[in-house]
């Protein structure tokens, strides 16, 4: 399995409550930013995929909050593919601060869909590029069962 993809995020004032902690729903935005960078690093920017009528709507999300992040904290978001097949992609995430405090763990599940938001199979070339870049091995055989690499380095 490839090492987790890492994305750094500096907490903005706008993401915080009056109590100076990140508002709980803003973490989903941070995960979205990390996921976008993940695809970009794979050579598959989401904007390019969208022009090919490919989108990946979230169909399930689980977030477990461990500690508070505060204004100006630098967060490290680790992203790992936990499921990849021609119809689905799932991610596990760990967010920690620069003091190695785990802020949260999360999972999201996505389906591959067309611009009409109806499910569609991921084109083989896109699947191969994602599979090779982030699951640490050669492309899975067409029609093979989903790749489910070992779990991430962080607890989920």
Image (tube, grey):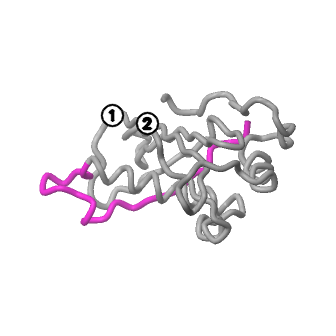
Locate residue 33, reporting x and y percent.
48, 59
Q: State which quarter of the image contains the N terminus.
A: top right
Q: Residue at x 66, y 43 (%)?
A: 87
Give neighbour class at mark 2: few <14, some 14-19, many 20+ (Cα, 10 Å).
many
**Image: magenta residue range:** 1-23
Q: Residue at x 22, y 51 (%)?
A: 21
CA distance separating discs 2 and 1: 8 Å
Give neighbour class at mark 1: few <14, some 14-19, many 20+ (Cα, 10 Å).
few
Residue projecting furthest to the left: 18
**Residue 6, magenta (yes or no):** yes
**Residue 3, magenta (yes or no):** yes
| In-front residue for pair 28/88 | 88
Give the quadrant of residue 47: bottom right
Badge 2 element = strand
Q: Residue at x 42, y 39 (%)?
A: 61
Q: Residue at x 45, y 39 (%)?
A: 60
Main secondary structure of the magenta stretch: loop
Locate residue 22, reporting x and y percent.
26, 52
Q: Which mark is residue 105?
A: 2
The residue at which mark 1 appears reads as: 66
């Amino acid at each position: 399995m490839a090492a987790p993809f890492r994305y750094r995020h500096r907490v903005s004032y706008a993401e915080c409550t009056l109590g100076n902690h990140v508002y709980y729903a803003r973490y989903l935005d941070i995960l979205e930013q990390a996921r976008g960078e993940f695809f970009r690093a794979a050579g598959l920017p989401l904007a390019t995929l969208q022009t090919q009528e490919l989108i990946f709507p979230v169909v399930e999300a689980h977030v477990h909050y461990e500690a508070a992040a505060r204004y100006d904290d630098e967060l490290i978001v680790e992203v790992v593919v936990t499921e990849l097949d021609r119809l689905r992609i799932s991610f596990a995430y760990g967010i920690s601060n620069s003091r190695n405090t785990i802020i949260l763990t999360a999972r999201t599940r996505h389906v591959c869909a067309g611009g009409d938001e109806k499910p569609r199979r991921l084109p083989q070339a896109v699947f191969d590029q994602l599979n090779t870049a982030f699951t640490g091995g050669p492309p899975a055989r067409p029609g093979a069962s989903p790749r489910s690499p070992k779990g991430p380095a962080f607890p989920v």
